[in-house]
């Protein structure tokens, strides 16, 4: 009999019962395998202690809960461009990773909040899914390390009384659902947010510092890039949300002005984008995907956490929509872009139910 | 609703109190820093609060979420400087000053090596050392159960290689 693989020996260390009897019998009588098993066991112990940290009992759960209760937002399911209002790009680029970990946030926000935070630098005409892990999301370089980011217009998101008020505040019609799916009842709550604008001014000196901090050299800066600016804009946005009595959202319908970007200072947007893509810290596979996607500058790569969600395409009133379905089957979402406006429908429903809501919107 | 503003799920406080120390421990395993681990845990529970994950599956879900979030933070290169970390996290045991330095250097080397591992390999390693079964690790990372052992073993060998390289004299 052949020696069991190193993977089987490793499992034997942790879960002998999970290893087939034949393999166990072989290892027990094979000096080579026994040595390899011992070595796997010793290595596992060493790594366990290297990864070990302070004891769990030291954690102050009461204080942590107090902090958590104070910080948790009241209506978190739809947050148009929330990070920008915190005046921190660092927060903005971190947030999507957290969002991506929660299928509800990703899907009930129809990916819009995440997309706004994450890639406002691509003008959006269509949504195209990119298979990326949650890890890729936060590896987009923290742009504040490469220049100055100033919020020039705050979105001031808030809950409003009704669809008419939402429209008044934003100029966007809240999509009207003609027929609610089974299980979705009651009146929705409405959210509205204005436009968020920001100016990012590239600084070669800051970028060089940031690269040095990572132990890397800054790629040569193209002529004219130092001091050039990008004007980023996203929103406005409106949403209607239905929830169970427990507060768990069942259906969200949202419409948001897709993010746009203008370059100024005589530099082409393509130049800025390509340079940003070349900065240390950007995962090569994601950079390659972005390269492919943004050749025409008209697509929004929608961040989709591959571990949690599967994607497919469907047609909604002539537009190509991206259908997101969580692997656990609990959530789904449908999102599409038309004339620079992203519309999303998401919730704790099946993709088919959501598609029929999407197609029935007025 | 358990408490005024945190009202997304009625079981949130119970799940929080029941799992918080463990979620911090998972994140600390990745980051080597208690403060950062607590930040990660807060983010993870915020996501959980908005989710419809059944309470009896919360433990596994939270462990996986904490692992991904912490690895993302580790790999984002946006961690605080090593000096700041030394200031807020003492070692668990500190026999003497020389050991202390080695421990800290090793911990830093472990984190550097973790950050360089492919995400899935690093996640499998952390999940396994956080007590998830092979079947759970496989489900969480979309691996076949048979390949979890191989993935974990390779990650361990890689980590030890980095540590040995770090420990050997120049």
Image (cartoon, helix red, strand yellow):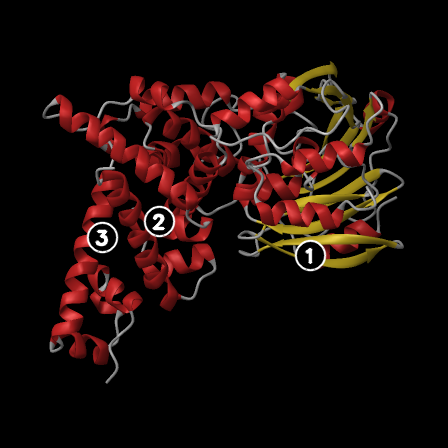
Q: Which residue is mark 2?
A: B127
As rendered, which of A163 and B124 lies closer to the eye? B124
Q: Residues within 10 Å of mark 2 (few under 14, many from 20)?
A: many
Determine the CA span between mark 2 and mark 3: 13 Å
| Contact flag, marks 1 and 2 (Cβ < 8 Å) | no
The picture places residue A336, in percent across and down from the top left corner, at 79, 47
Kind of element beneath mark 1: helix
Q: Which residue is mark 1?
A: A351
Nearest to the eye among marks 1 and 2: give it.
2
Q: Are marks 2 and 3 on the same chain?
A: no
Q: From this viewpoint, is residue A284 visible?
A: yes
As rendered, which of A42 and B137 lies closer to the eye? A42
- Using residue B60 as the reference point, say whether residue A275 is left or right of it: right
Q: Which residue is mark 3?
A: A44
Q: Quarter of the image holding residue A32?
A: bottom left
Determine the CA span between mark 1 and mark 2: 31 Å
Q: Are marks 1 and 3 on the same chain?
A: yes
As rendered, which of A215 and B169 lies closer to the eye? B169
Q: Residues within 10 Å of mark 1 (few under 14, many from 20)?
A: many
Q: Most extreme residue toward the front, as rendered?
A: B170
Kind of element beneath mark 3: helix
Q: From this viewpoint, is residue A256 visible?
A: no
Chain hosting mark 1: A
Kind of element beneath mark 2: helix
The picture places residue A309, in percent across and down from the top left corner, at 59, 53
């Amino acid at each position: 009999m052949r020696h069991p693989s190193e993977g089987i020996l490793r499992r034997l260390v942790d879960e002998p019962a999970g290893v087939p009897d034949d393999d166990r019998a072989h290892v027990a009588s094979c000096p080579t395998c026994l040595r390899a098993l011992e070595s796997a066991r010793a290595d596992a112990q060493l790594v366990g202690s290297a990864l070990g940290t302070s004891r769990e009992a030291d954690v102050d759960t009461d204080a942590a809960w107090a902090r958590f209760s104070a910080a948790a937002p009241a209506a978190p399911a739809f947050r148009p461009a929330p990070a920008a209002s915190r005046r921190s790009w660092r927060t903005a680029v971190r947030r999507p990773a957290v969002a991506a970990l929660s299928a509800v946030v990703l899907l009930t926000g129809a990916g819009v909040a995440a997309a706004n935070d994450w890639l406002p630098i691509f003008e959006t005409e269509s949504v195209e899914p990119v298979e990326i892990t949650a890890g890729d999301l936060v590896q987009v370089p923290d742009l504040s390390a490469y220049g100055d980011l100033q919020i020039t217009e705050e979105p001031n998101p808030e809950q409003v009384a009704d669809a008419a008020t939402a429209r008044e505040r934003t100029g966007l019609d809240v999509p009207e659902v003609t027929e609610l799916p089974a299980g979705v009842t009651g009146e929705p709550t409405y959210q509205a947010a204005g436009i968020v604008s920001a100016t990012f001014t590239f600084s070669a000196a800051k970028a060089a510092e940031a690269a040095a901090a990572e132990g890397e050299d800054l790629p040569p800066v193209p002529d004219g890039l130092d001091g050039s600016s990008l004007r980023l804009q996203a929103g406005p946005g409106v949403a209607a949300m239905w929830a169970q009595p427990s507060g768990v959202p069942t259906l969200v319908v949202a419409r948001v002005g897709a993010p746009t970007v203008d370059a100024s200072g005589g530099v082409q947007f393509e130049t800025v984008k390509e340079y940003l893509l070349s900065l240390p810290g950007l995962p090569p596979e994601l950079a390659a995907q972005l390269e492919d996607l943004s050749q025409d500058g008209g697509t929004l790569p929608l961040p989709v956490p591959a571990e949690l969600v599967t994607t497919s395409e469907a047609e909604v009133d002539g537009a190509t929509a991206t259908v997101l379905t969580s692997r656990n089957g609990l959530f789904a979402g449908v999102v599409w872009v038309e004339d620079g406006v992203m519309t999303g429908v998401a919730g704790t429903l099946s993709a088919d139910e959501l598609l029929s809501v999407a197609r029935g919107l007025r | 609703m358990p408490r005024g503003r945190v009202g997304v799920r009625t079981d949130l406080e119970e799940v929080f109190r029941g799992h918080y120390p463990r979620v911090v421990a998972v994140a600390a395993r990745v980051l080597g820093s208690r403060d950062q681990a607590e930040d990660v845990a807060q983010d993870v529970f915020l996501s959980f609060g908005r989710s419809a994950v059944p309470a009896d599956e919360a433990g596994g879900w939270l462990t996986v979420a904490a692992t991904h979030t912490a690895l993302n933070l580790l790999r984002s290169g946006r961690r605080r400087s090593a000096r700041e970390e030394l200031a807020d996290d003492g070692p668990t045991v500190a026999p003497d000053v020389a050991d202390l330095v080695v421990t800290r250097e090793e911990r830093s080397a472990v984190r550097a090596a973790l950050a360089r591992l492919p995400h899935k390999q690093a996640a499998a390693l952390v999940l396994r050392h956080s007590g998830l079964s092979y079947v759970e690790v496989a489900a969480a990372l979309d691996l076949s159960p048979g390949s979890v052992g191989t993935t974990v073993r390779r990650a361990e060998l890689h980590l030890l290689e980095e540590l040995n390289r770090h420990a050997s004299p120049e």
